[in-house]
Amino acid sequence: MSNNRVLDTVIVGAGFAGMYSLHKQLSDGFNAEIFEKADDVGGTWYWNKYPGARCDIESMDYSYSFSEELQQEWNWKEKYGTQPELLKYARFVSKKFNLREKINFKTTIIKASFINKKWKIETDNNIIIECKYLVLATGNLSTPNTPKIKGISNFKGKIYHTGAWPKEMPVFKDRKVGIIGTGSSGVQSIPIISETAEKLFVFQRTANFSLPARHHKLPEDKRENYKKDYKKYRDLAKNSSFGIAKYQPPTKSAFDVSDDERNDIYERAWREGGQAMLFAFTDLLTNEEANKTAADFVRNKIKKIVRDKETAEKLCPNDHPIGTKRLCLDSNYFETYNKENVSLIDISNHPIQEITDNGLITNNIEYSFDDLVFATGFDAMTGAVNAIEILNEKNISLKSIWSNGPKTYLGIMVSEFPNLFMITGPQSPGVKSQMILSIEQHVDFIHNLIIHKRNNKYYQVNANKNKQEEWVNHNNEVANATLYPLAHSWYNGDNIAGKTRNFMPYVGGVANYKNICDEKIKNNYEGFEFL
Ligand code: FAD
Ligand code: N01
């Protein structure tokens, strides 16, 4: 592709959001291209190649619904798709819809300035593009966070981050490995690394809740039956809170049933696998006592699984209500701590003092290993956007405006940044949902907005500042009526040193959110200003 050019639309990122956005744009005759820093499509599923990486929402749900042909043609092999399968799926989509020729790989967008009613976009390889619309499909979990720990450059072994895993799988056989972090990435990778490593040291700052995934191959008949009724399942998902067909809103409080009944319900959910337990009662995420019934159930399970009492105690989460951090799903995570070659090191009261040539020091004890894995997560939700210098007409950067936390209108636009759109941005339900469903809904909304603008010959759309403020306040009110803010999590920005605490996702549910968006359209795009 040529260097400098003029386009209708620049889309940043070739994950599921960017690809669908490009497809919509091309289908409606816009001159659009994607710019992607990786050398392939896939986004999350390109970067997170760590051992055990897979989705934790069943693949029959966690997939595109926009094309009936695609959803009938593609055959998921497993209940929860593996990273290689998801990457293959992303590539398949990019080829089926002829997207690749419009994707500039190995190109990072570094700057975007709104000048004379157009966006001027600059890349790290000196391409300059002028365009009407800028769509940020940069991902919520795409900026890996490596904590700044003293001595890191001294480490003589190999260092990996789960969120930027090398293409060639490292061999841990007969090696001593240290891993920092016990979030979803740690919980998935620890059991697999322990299978071959001579020794695995797990450095845990906070114990995390995890439920069994009960993963299995997807039987062909089950898959085909699901496909026959795909529309029904997709509609159920759209009308749910989290965008998952089988988890419909519960109707009873945890205290509407006897202790025995409640326990039976949790036991069935535990055996079934997945997140079912969290959807058992209406008040699990709003009432601490109700939540404790589920948390106690899981803590008791951990104590039954893990043989060493002291280790089991350390693995029991006690600092947050269950479900208020992203709930992990695992395959034999707690069982892994019964293995001779695995040691759990509780660093909750003893932060890592230093990384040394051969390992690390905590609580004045040095642990030696050959390889160090950071499963330390991401600068979530704002990291990738803030990494681009985005300047509005007054030359004010989005990063500076967001310095005390992000503010958006519907998670889609930011006031005073005209013609700039975000897919599943802060204050949208994106990360609190089956994300591909939210991505599709956002892309459709943004696309309608652009078409409305084109049809009416407007040159600019901007989010109204007061409406944005109202939306942010509503977002906070909804979050504060739940237990979510009680947890220290990336939802609040707590995992990044110096990041202002702000609860970022919209937790009112995908169905409510879609209704709100539909209302805005009905009310002549309420909150959006057209010029
Ligand atoms: P991404 O997939 O993150 O893609 C963003 C792309 O933008 C990346 O390729 C990145 O390289 C590119 N980019 C960013 N900045 C720039 C720039 N300046 N210039 C050029 N390119 C740029 N969600 C679920 O709903 N269910 C799951 O089971 C699930 N599992 C997950 C497992 C893991 C390990 C992780 C990390 C996340 C998971 N998620 C899951 C969330 C997942 O991120 C989303 O489901 C979805 O894949 C996000 O797609 P996206 O296109 O919005 O962003
Ligand atoms: O990251 P995390 P993740 N010293 O932030 C620890 C999605 N995802 O990559 O809890 C010591 O959850 C940190 O400790 P603490 C999913 O949305 C999904 O695991 O902050 N420890 C924590 O234990 C998920 O939520 C899947 O005290 C430090 C861990 O590192 C999101 O991505 C799989 C530390 C980070 O956990 C992020 O998950 C993977 C330090 N300085 C990811 N800094 C699925 O299964 C951080 N930690 C679908």
Image (spheres, grey):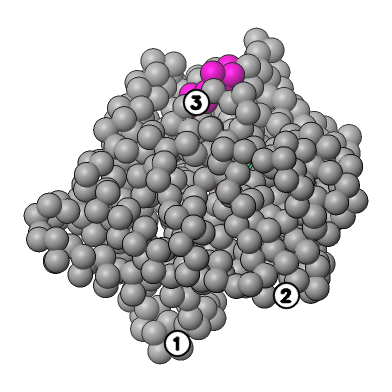
Instruction: Report the residue marked by disc 3.
Output: 501
Secondary structure at badge 3 equals loop
Instruction: Describe residue 484's horizontal placement relative to residue 446 as left or right.
Output: left
Distance between mark 3 and mark 2 Cα atoms: 39 Å
**First-in-chain label (3 vs 2):** 2
Residue 500, percent across and down?
A: 54, 23
The residue mark sitting in front, 1 or 3, is 3
Instruction: Report the residue marked by disc 2.
Output: 196
Kindly indicate the quadrant of the structure image that contains residue 513.
top left
Give the residue type that dot 3 points to: Arg
Instruction: Read off the magenta span.
Output: 401-408
- Taking the magenta stretch, the answer to whether it contains residue 119 is no
**First-in-chain label (1 vs 3):** 1
Instruction: Report the residue marked by disc 1.
Output: 219
Give the residue type that dot 1 points to: Pro
- Taking the magenta stretch, the answer to whether it contains residue 406 is yes
Instruction: Describe residue 418's horizontal placement relative to residue 517 as left or right.
Output: right
Kindly indicate the quadrant of the structure image that contains residue 169.
bottom right
Residue 521, percent across and down?
A: 34, 36
Secondary structure at badge 2 equals helix
Q: In this view of the protein, can residue 94 be seen by the observer?
A: no
> What residue is at 64 percent from the left and 56 percent from the top?
202
Residue 112, percent across and down?
A: 72, 27
The residue mark sitting in front, 3 or 2, is 2
